[in-house]
Amino acid sequence: MLMPRKVKHRKIHRGGWSGGKATSGDKVSFGSYGLKATEEGLVSARQIEAARRAMTRSIQRGGKVWIRIFPDKPMTKKGEQTPMGKGKGSVDHFVAKIRAGKMLFELDGIAKETAAEAMRLAAHKLAIKTKFVERQ
């Protein structure tokens, strides 16, 4: 699974959403087809890996896949049966913070129908709504 090799701060604040749409990484830049987020949310490293596996299995080792997001935000979790207080929990997993309009995955080297089906399978693995787009 994807995760940072090294982080400056082990635990970080959750932080709020600045709102609005993504301005960078909102176009198909590398491949011919892309999977674009239509809403904001958090996508975990497990979801990204599951989507990648679904895509690569669907295209049967043909074409090329680009992952345009990276889970760099650590999420903490306290142990079961832990009372209130006692500080912040330990890092449990990493997530990518996604804004609406962000390009998540890109594909190239395969037919449009195959790409659309691969992206549909990948979209089912993610916790946010997405849409299939082509390069303009």
Image: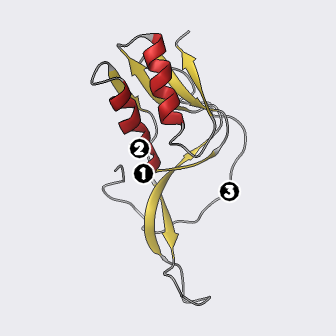
Return the residue at label 2. Answer: 50
Give the Cα distance between marks 2 and 3. Answer: 27 Å
Few, some or many C-alpha atoms within 10 Å of disc 2 (few <14, some 14-19, many ≥20)? some
Return the residue at label 1. Answer: 46
Quick check: 127 left or right of 79? right
Figure quadrant of the C terminus:
top right
Q: Position of residue 48 (x, y in %)?
A: 44, 43
Give the Cα distance between marks 1 and 2. Answer: 6 Å
The answer to whether one can see residue 5 in this image is: yes
Quick check: 99 left or right of 33? right
Q: Which mark is residue 127?
A: none
- At x 35% / y 13%, what residue is drawn? 109
- At x 42% / y 51%, what residue is drawn? 46
The answer to whether one can see residue 30 in this image is: no
- On the image, which quarter does residue 66 sit in? top left
Q: Return the residue nearer the eye: 3 or 50.
A: 50
Q: Does residue 131 lie above or below 6 as drawn?
A: above
Mark 3: amino acid: Gly
Return the residue at label 3. Answer: 16
Q: Position of residue 125 (x, y in %)?
A: 50, 42
Say how many tags the image has.
3
Q: Are marks 2 and 3 in contact (CB under 8 Å)?
A: no
Q: Position of residue 103 (x, y in %)?
A: 53, 30
Few, some or many C-alpha atoms within 10 Å of disc 3 (few <14, some 14-19, many ≥20)? few
Few, some or many C-alpha atoms within 10 Å of disc 1 (few <14, some 14-19, many ≥20)? some
Quick check: 2 left or right of 74? left
- Of label 2 and label 3, which has the lower sequence position? 3
- At x 66% / y 33%, what residue is drawn? 38
